[in-house]
Amino acid sequence: MVERKYRVFSGESTQPPPISALIQTANRFCCDIYMEVGSRQFNMKDYDEFQAGVQTVTQIFVLYFNGEDEQEAEGRFQTLFGGYEKAG
């Protein structure tokens, strides 16, 4: 399983990728991809679930990739979220 943390700063000029682009990208991979905010996890391949998760992000979110193509998926999402700072 691959884990990648990102820090989001409020008021930052960097805009996140559109949710539709993130969901389409997630669905290109076989591995499970989910976002963790606090103690809750949200499936990035499910629009309603992912939308609910995005609304709760305040500062840090964690992306998890689990499956045979997790490294490739993590690399693609790292490119998509390139404007965000990686958190420890």
Image (cartoon, helix red, strand yellow):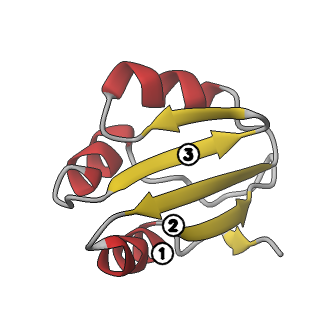
Residue 9 picture location, percent across and down: 81, 54
Q: Is residue 25 above or below residue 81?
A: above
User: How far apart are the two marked residues, 2 and 3, measured between alpha carbons?
Assistant: 13 Å
Residue type marked 1: Gln
Residue 55 picture location, percent across and down: 62, 26
Labels 1 & 2 near each other (Cβ < 8 A): yes
Residue type marked 2: Phe
Q: Is residue 37 above or below residue 84?
A: above
Residue that appears at 41% across and 68% down: 77
User: How far apart are the two marked residues, 1 and 2, measured between alpha carbons?
Assistant: 5 Å
SS at circle 2: loop
Q: Would residue 86 be found to the left or right of residue 16 on screen?
A: right
SS at circle 3: strand
| Mark sitting earlier along the chain (3/1) | 3
Give 52 or 19, whichever is nearer the viewer.
52
Residue 42 picture location, percent across and down: 52, 33
Residue 61 picture location, percent across and down: 69, 50
Residue type marked 3: Met
Give 65 or 23, whichever is nearer the viewer.
65
Q: Is residue 13 above or below residue 49?
A: below
User: How far apart are the two marked residues, 3 and 1, measured between alpha carbons?
Assistant: 13 Å
Residue that appears at 79% across and 48% down: 11
What residue sits right under mark 3 in the picture?
35
**Around disc 2, counting alpha carbons within 10 Å, would you say few (fewer than 14), some (14 to 19), or many (20 or more)?**
some
Which quarter of the figure is the C terminus placed in? bottom right
Q: Is residue 70 above or below residue 48?
A: below
Give 72 or 31, whichever is nearer the viewer.
31
SS at circle 1: helix
Residue that appears at 48% across and 75% down: 78
Q: Quadrant of residue 53?
A: top right
What residue sits right under mark 1 in the picture?
78
What residue sits right under mark 2 in the picture?
81
